[in-house]
Every structure is written in structure tokens, then in C-alpha cells.
Amino acid sequence: MELSQRLKKIPPYLFVELDRLKRRKVEEGADVIDLGIGDPDIPTPQEIVETAKRALEKSEYHRYPANPGSLFFRKACAQYMKRRFGVTFDPEREVLALIGSKEGIAHFPIAFVNPGDIVLCPDPAYPVYHLGTIFTDGEPYYLPLTWDKDFLPDLGSIPEEILRRTKILWLNYPNNPTGAVASKEFFQEAIDLAKKYDFIVAHDSAYVELYFEEPPVSIFEVDGAKDVAIEFHSLSKTFCMTGWRIGFAVGNGEIVQALAKVKSNFDSGVFTAIQEAGAFALENLDTLVPPLRKIFQERRDFLYEELKKLGYELKKPQATFYLWVRVPSGYSSSEFCKKVLEELAIVVTPGNGFGSAGEGYFRIALTVDIERLKEAVRRLGTLKL
Ligand SMILES: Cc1ncc(COP(=O)(O)O)c(C=O)c1O
């Protein structure tokens, strides 16, 4: 069967070899510590589960959901944006429910990108920005995120002819995989550039509540953002709800409505009972999330200190549950990750899997408990480099 040209353009999955190795290790009976997946090991808070159970009983929810999301859910999103960032959104026009933020991110380019248009994508990055671009026959232009620039793209270095052809600039802070956060000044620079060259800034905010020091900002806290920006939010990481599939987009009404139009032709919305649980979660964020943050902070502090003691180079992440670590010299990302898996039965993700600028790094997800992290550190201490 001949695949479509578009599907053929999707690069091969980089982790095939590592996945095979991991499966083999498990089959051999090894005690594998998986620090690879960005999926919290902690269950969703019980109050959210109870809300969903009650909502399941409502027979009116058993029919098709409202396509852009129920108004009660979109109001809860708008109220959260107001409470947390001080910005106002019209829940009817400027807020849209998503089946997880990945769904919105993947579909978004369809609303604006024509063949040959440029989409600016960070590198390393969550792969959906450039994959969504490829599905629309757009051209990704990669913006390297480097250690010396604190993993922020150098917007001043993008050539003029690229900026003139740009439709979307993707940003993601707090950042996966580097753990970096962005300042208002950086967001202002991005918005000013977008207004000058008439493109959209699409900001992926999936980790905005997983912080350990200062709360990260929304792009809408800077002047003019409402003219050109959309922001993607996720309940997945904030409330340990990755399996529930719920997120939302907020932003400029025209931009949000364009995505709503795309989505109304692809899907039929989020199950209303899940939206009720999601609204409850957002309304109770201030009591539900601090205990979760505390758990991830304890893991981050522990592993950061221990990796430093072992001689690894990394910056202390202010947010997200990832550590972005330099590979010891003499190894490529893949070679090092393979060695760690083969010799220590620890899974970590090679940085080049997130883009070529990720070469020389590996990513650790803090998604196992502290006892397992202690065991991982013990094993790392035995590694002969
Ligand atoms: C940067 C980033 N954005 C978006 C997502 C998607 O999250 P979800 O679709 O669960 O909302 C992820 C998931 O790993 C992510 O790392």
C-alpha cells in the first residue's frame, strides 16, 4: 500500500532501537527504571475523580458534547486565566476546549499554513510543532535553543526573507525538554516581531503550573499579545490527568475561531463529564496542585544535586518535571543512552530525539518516586565512562 506523500515526509521514529533494547531488558527480567516518559506516575487527585464519577451519571452528558466545549468549562478556563495571569478572555469567542493540548497543537497549522509557508519551530522541541507543519506542506524553520542563550531562541538571528514568509512562531515555556522558562521581556520581543512581520505566535503552555520558584508568565501578560497570539493549555501535567485528554486554547478571537472551524470538521468535542471534572480542577487549582508540585520539587532537588555530585553538567530547572543534562564527553546522545540502558537498566531519552540541536544532551523525566531515583543514582555512580 502506497503511503501519502505527506506521511512519507514524517521522519522515522528515532527511538526504535532504544525501545527494542528496553523491551529486551524487561523480558530478561531486569529491574528497569524508566525515566523516559513525560507521564506523571501520581494518580489524579481523588476530588477530581469523584467529580467525574458524579458527572458520568448525568444522562444529558451521554449525547454529543458542545463542539467548542461547554460554556461552563470555557468560563472556568477564562476565570483561571484572569485569576492566575490577570488577563481577560471572552469564554464564547476566545476560549476553546481541546482533546488534550496535543490535538489543538497538531491541528492548528491547518487553519493558517499554505504549502511553502514557513513555520518557526524551536529545536530541541516537542515534535508536534514541526510534524503538524509537515502535514500542511508548510516548511519548518528551526530555531536552536542553546545552553549559552538559556534555551531561548535568538529571534534577532532569523533572516528577513524567512520572517516575511513566516505564518506561525511556536514557543513553549516552561520548556520541554530543557526545563527553561521565559521572561515577559522575551515574550514582548516575540510579539513585537510577529506584529512587524504579520505572523501568529502560538505558545504552548502545557507546563505553566509545574513550577518550583516564581510562577511562569502567560504570553498574554505582554502588550499587544491579544492581536497575534494563541496559547495552548493542558490539564494533563498540572493535575496528573494525561489519560483524560483535556486542554484548552485561549487567544485572539479570530485565531481561536479559525482553530474551532478546523476542529469542528475533525472531531466532536470533549466528553462533557470530563469537562465537568476539568472545570472543577481549574477552579480548585490552588488547593489541588501545591502538593503535586512539592513532590516534583523534592525529586528535582534530589536528582539535580546528585547528578552534580556525579559530575554531570545541567542547569537547575525552574519548572517542568524534566532535567536536561549534557552527555559526558566522548559519547553521542544515542550512544550514552544506549550504554545507560544496557549497563544500568535505566531509560533516559537521547536529546537528538527532540531535534538536531538536542544532540549532546539527554532528558530525564522525574516520573518515578524518590526511592527509585535513589536507586537510579546508585546505579549511575557505578557507570564506567
Ligand atoms: C510541550 C508539550 N506540549 C504539549 C503536550 C501535550 O499534552 P496533552 O496533549 O496531554 O495536553 C506535551 C506532552 O508531553 C508536551 O510535552
Image: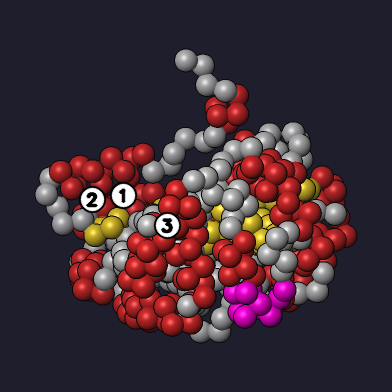
Q: Predominant secondary structure in magenta?
A: helix
Quadrant of the image occupied by residue 266 = top right
Residue 110 seen in this snapshot: yes
Residue corresponding to mark 1? 338
Element under label 2? Answer: helix
Q: Which residue is mark 3?
A: 58
Task: Please report the residue visible at 15 percent of the width from the left and 43 percent of the height from the top.
Answer: 27
- Which residue is rendered at x = 60% and y = 24% of the image? 5
Examine the image and state in which quarter residue 92 appears.
Answer: bottom right
For this rendering, which residue is in front, 342 or 259? 259
Residue type marked 1: Lys
Image: 190 above or below 122: below
Q: Which residues are magenta?
A: 79-88
Task: Say what secondary structure mark 1 lies in.
Answer: helix
Q: Is residue 221 above or below residue 16?
A: below
Marks 2 and 1: CB-CB under 8 Å? yes
In the picture of the structure, the residue carrying the numbered disc 2 is 342
Q: Residues within 10 Å of mark 3 (few under 14, many from 20)?
A: few
The answer to whether the residue bearing label 1 lies less than 8 angstroms from the nearest atom of ligand 1 is: no
> What is the C-alpha distance between the residues marked 2 and 3?
51 Å
> Do callouts 1 and 3 mark residues in contact (Cβ within 8 Å)?
no
On screen, residue 257 versus residue 238, left or right, reads right
